[in-house]
Amino acid sequence: MKKHIIAVLILMGVSINQIHVAQCIYFEARGEGPEGWKVVMATIYTRVMSTDYPDTVHDVIWQPSQFSWTQDDKSDVPKNKEVFRRILTWVQQQSPKELAKMGVTHYHSASIRPYWANHLAFLGKVGNHLLYRDT
């Protein structure tokens, strides 16, 4: 995301973590609505609070090969500003610690079957995403 946009959002009281989470939700699940957004945010914060993953939101999101949008060589600036604003507002209303209690460490679209899914505990389905946790 462009630095001047981030600076303006921070001046408006938005934390850098909230910006990063909203950006990740935008690219991972913007069309899913709040239930799908919850999955992405829960995954990020479950990982942040785990000793098995990086300990910052930024580092969890940008850990290699974890979120598909971070490695697609496309722009990381949301094109639909209204959708991004709605996601950011939603993120600001959430409790990261509460979402982390869901225990979700991985998810994927129901339309694919990644190799790692067989090695994790299946938690259920929300929207178009299948949810898992480390075993």
Image (cartoon, rainbow, N blue to C red):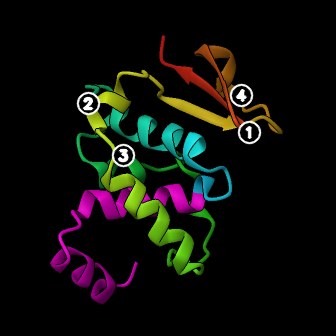
| Circle 2 residues within 10 Å: few <14, some 14–19, many ≥20 | some
**Disc 4 from disc 2: Cα separation:** 25 Å
Rendered image: mark on residue 115: 4
From the image, give the main secondary structure of the stretch colored magenta: helix
- Which residues, given as a range, are shown in magenta? 1-27
The answer for how far apart the CA atoms under marks 4 and 3 are is 20 Å
User: CA separation, marks 3 and 2?
Assistant: 10 Å
Mark 3 or mark 2: whose residue is earlier in sequence: 2
Q: Amino acid at mark 3?
A: Val
Is label 2 in a helix, a strand or a loop? loop
- Tag on residue 128? 1
Q: Residues within 10 Å of mark 4 (few under 14, many from 20)?
A: few
Q: In the rendered structure, find residue 60 and report the number of the disc placed on it.
A: 3
Instruction: Give coordinates of residue 133: x percent, y percent.
Output: 50, 19
**How dense is the environment of label 3, judged by Cα within 10 Å: few (below 14), some, or many (20 and up)?**
some
Q: Which residue is mark 2?
A: 49
